[in-house]
Image (spheres, grey):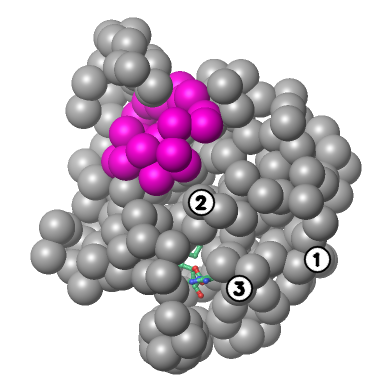
Amino acid sequence: MRSGGAVDSNVTYLSRLDEGVISEIGGNADHPMRKVTRQVAFDPGGWTLERASKVTKLFDEMALTWKDKDFNSRVLPVLDAVARGGIKPAGIGIELGCGTGAYSSMLSAYFDTLLCVDISFEMLANSTSPESFRIRGDGSNLPFPDNSVDGLVCINTLLFPAEVDRILKSSGYLVWVSSSGNQTPIYLSPDDVCDALGGKFVGVSSEAGPGTWSVFHRR
Ligand SMILES: C[S@@+](CC[C@H](N)C(=O)[O-])C[C@H]1O[C@@H](n2cnc3c(N)ncnc32)[C@H](O)[C@@H]1O
């Protein structure tokens, strides 16, 4: 990972402020979700009904135990993204792929309204943030109008570039967090995210705790 304020063509990499934490969870380049993540991000036809059904089943089955994961250090990249990502917290926020809501209560403090979306009913049903507004929905076809969202937060979930571009206001931003950095099973590097967004966005990125974060604004 580049650091030290290095400027890539579309992503500016900030130095990390802490000493880092070694991730203890698995996930690597061979993880089956890596292929899905890349295909969905780079191929508009990559998200099929069959794939949606398989992914939903996979996460439905993991929902009961998902909330027992240790999220303590994994909030660090989110906090750093908010502190240094050039975000003006307010307005309408969407947390896509919210899972069991480990980050939802924290994120709700940054928006006037936060809507938490997930394709897995079981994830939503087992939420540890039961006060959050939870919506069962598919990130490839979100139930929100064009240009209506101030901030879209994606933590360890899939990227659907066309929907990012469609729902975000001109001043809107995408927060992309991989809570175990490049060990995260559903992972795209900041440059990959930028490329998948088709050159319409520029980003700032860094590392915190065991994870990485990026915030993208429109050019
Ligand atoms: C790896 S989990 C991450 C959950 C949570 N963000 C976290 O970090 O604990 C990925 C989540 O994305 C959801 N997801 C996968 N594909 C989705 C889609 N097309 N639309 C909405 N949610 C999706 C899954 O159901 C799952 O809850």
Q: Which residue is mark 1?
A: 133
Residue beneath disc 3: 138
Query: Disc 1 to disc 3, how far (Cα)?
Result: 15 Å
Is the residue marked by circle 1 packed among few (<14), some (14-19), or many (20+) residues within 10 Å? some
Q: Which residues are magenta?
A: 189-211
> Any magenta on residue 15?
no
Q: Is residue 98 above or below residue 32?
A: above
Instruction: Rate crowding at label 2 as few (under 14), some (14 to 19) or many (20 or more) other CA atoms within 10 Å.
Output: many
Q: Position of residue 47 (x, y in %)?
A: 43, 73
Give the image quarter of residue 82.
top right
User: Residue at point 38% right, 22% down?
Assistant: 11
For image coordinates 84% across by 38% down, the residue present is 91
- Going 67% across and 49% down the picture, which residue do you hit? 166
Residue 140 vs residue 37: left or right?
right
> Split into 4 quadrants, where in the image is the C terminus?
top right
CA distance separating discs 1 and 2: 23 Å
Residue 43 visible, this angle: yes
| 61 to 174, vertically: above or below | below
- Numbered label attached to residue 161: 2
**3D distance between C-alphas at marks 3 and 2:** 13 Å
